[in-house]
Every structure is written in structure tokens, then in C-alpha cells.
């Protein structure tokens, strides 16, 4: 399910989401839709979109961003697969991803990159890595999405599978941070807004967060679907 929440800061909006949905903060994904810094004559404002694994409606109340808060619901029980990641589950995930790329016509191996609470990192190594990463990481994102669907079918909806190849995720983050600051400087100089290329939720949130501390620049997500665009625009000091 997808809900929207608002707050004066990102933390306040996330805290409100956790309280009203009755779930822990690490049990949902957060996408920043709009962020405005506070100024002398204006209050800070952050609008977020929350993605949960719950397919059912809230028990009562209006939309999550509405004036009437939903009643607290029961917390979900422990995940089907248990808290720890089993060796069998890891082997199944590796076999699944290797099978995917093999059916795509490319060879490669998958290994465990890291293990964290509610997160499992997989490393994809292949001589065709550039193809499997794809333009702007879209192929890698698609493979990662399928891996997460498979993990859910294995009873591990509580886990997030992160698929990486040739340290693309880190390199992409560094590139986006540089892009955010470069475009922000351009916006402050020209006083015109700039619309960035379509990005996935994680990349968009990185742009929003990076520029959140620049008082005279604000950001907003535009568009529909998974790949929205971030508009960076000049607000001036108020």
C-alpha cells in the first residue's frame, strides 16, 4: 500500500507515518515527494510517500495524509522466515539471480556482499556487467526488483535484497550528489528551475536529502509511476 504524510521535517513526517500506521520505521520505504526549507517568514515542509508491504486497507480513518488519523492496527507477527537469514535462503537467492541472468543469455556469478538487519546484499560479477547494469542502472534495478519479489515468495517479505555490480550503487550515489550540487548552483545563478532525468525512488530521495540544507533551493518530485523526475528550483532567502 502507498500512503502520504506531511511534516515540518523529514524526521517528523516519518515519525508520523510510523505512529499512524502502527509499524516500525524500518518496515516501510520512504520517498520524499517535496521538501521546503524553513525561512524567516515560512515554515519548513516535507511531504513523503510511504510504501508498505501491506496489501489491505487501514482499519479506519481517511487517507494517511488526511486530517483524521487511522486507528492503530495490530503489529504484524514475526516474519515467516524468522529474523535471521538462513543459509538455505541465501543459496536460493543466489541460484535465482544466477538463473535470471543465464536466461537473459549472459554468464555470471552471484555471491553475498553483506548481511545487515532486514537487508541482504548480493554481488553480481560478470564480463557483461555493463549490460546487466544497464543505462542509469535500470536493468540492475529490474533484476533487484525480481529478486525482492522472489524473496517475498520465500516468506521473507521483511528483507530487502540489494543487488550490486562493480560498486555501481556507490558510484551512482557519488555521481548524484555531485549532480545535485552542480544543478543547485546553476539554479541559484539563473533563478530558473531545472528538471532532472527520471529516477527511481532511492535516487530521488538522495537528491532531495542532499539539497535539503540549502536554504534558497527547493526540490519537488513530478510525474507518475516508479520513475519520476525531480525539479530543482530557486526560492530565494525569505
Image (cartoon, rainbow, N blue to C red):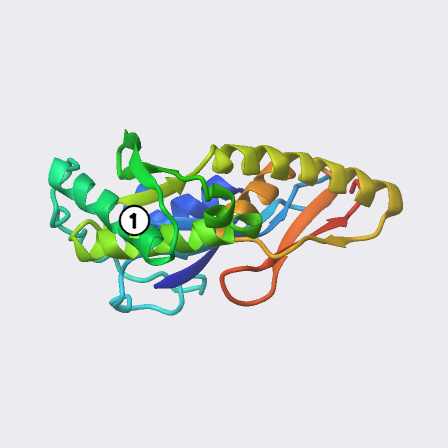
Crowdedness of circle 1 by 10 Å Cα count: few (<14), some, many (20+)? Answer: many
Q: Where is residue 208 in the image (x, y as percent from the top left)?
A: 60, 44
Q: Position of residue 29 (x, y in %)?
A: 39, 49
Which quadrant of the figure has residue 85? top left
Q: Position of residue 25 (x, y in %)?
A: 34, 43
x 66%, y 41%: residue: 38
x 38%, y 57%: residue: 104
Q: Could you say which is closer to the camera, residue 143 or residue 174?
A: 143
- Decide if residue 25 is in sight here: no
In terms of secondary structure, where does tag 1 sit?
Answer: helix
x 61%, y 57%: residue: 198
Q: Quadrant of the N terminus?
A: bottom left
Looking at the rendered structure, the number of numbered marks drawn on it comes to: 1
Q: Position of residue 174 (x, y in %)?
A: 59, 32
Q: Could you say which is closer to the camera, residue 236 or residue 110?
A: 110
x 65%, y 42%: residue: 37
50 sits left or right of 231 in the view = left
Which quadrant of the figure has residue 24? top left
Q: Mark 1 points at which residue?
A: 97
- Decide if residue 129 is in sight here: yes
Q: Quadrant of the C terminus?
A: top right
206 sits left or right of 157 in the view = right
Q: Could you say which is closer to the camera, residue 63 or residue 131?
A: 131
Which quadrant of the figure has residue 26? top left
Amino acid at each position: 500500500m502507498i500512503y502520504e504524510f506531511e511534516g515540518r521535517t523529514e524526521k517528523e513526517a516519518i515519525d508520523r507515518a510510523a505512529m499512524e500506521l502502527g509499524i516500525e520505521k524500518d518496515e516501510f520505504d520512504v520517498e520524499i515527494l517535496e521538501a521546503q526549507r524553513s525561512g524567516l517568514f515560512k515554515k519548513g515542509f516535507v511531504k513523503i510517500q510511504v510504501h508498505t508491504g501491506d496489501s489491505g486497507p487501514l482499519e479506519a480513518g481517511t487517507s494517511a495524509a488526511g486530517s483524521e488519523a487511522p486507528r492503530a492496527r495490530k503489529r504484524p507477527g514475526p516474519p515467516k522466515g524468522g529474523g535471521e537469514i538462513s543459509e538455505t535462503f541465501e543459496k536460493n537467492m543466489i541460484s535465482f539471480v544466477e538463473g535470471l541472468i543465464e536466461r537473459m543469455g549472459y554468464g555470471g556469478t552471484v555471491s553475498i556482499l553483506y548481511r545487515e538487519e532486514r537487508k541482504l546484499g548480493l554481488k553480481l560479477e560478470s564480463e557483461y556487467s555493463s549490460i546487466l547494469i544497464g543505462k542509469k542502472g535500470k536493468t540492475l534495478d529490474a533484476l533487484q526488483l525480481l529478486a525482492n519479489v522472489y524473496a517475498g515468495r520465500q516468506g521473507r517479505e521483511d528483507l530487502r535484497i540489494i543487488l550490486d555490480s562493480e560498486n555501481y550503487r556507490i558510484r551512482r550515489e557519488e555521481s548524484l550528489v555531485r549532480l545535485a550540487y552542480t544543478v543547485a548552483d546553476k539554479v541559484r545563478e539563473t533563478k530558473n528551475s531545472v528538471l532532472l532525468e527520471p529516477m527511481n525512488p532511492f535516487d530521488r530521495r538522495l537528491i532531495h536529502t542532499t539539497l535539503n540544507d540549502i536554504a534558497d533551493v527547493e526540490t519537488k518530485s513530478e510525474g507518475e509511476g516508479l520513475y519520476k523526475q525531480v525539479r530543482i528550483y530557486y526560492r530565494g532567502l525569505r
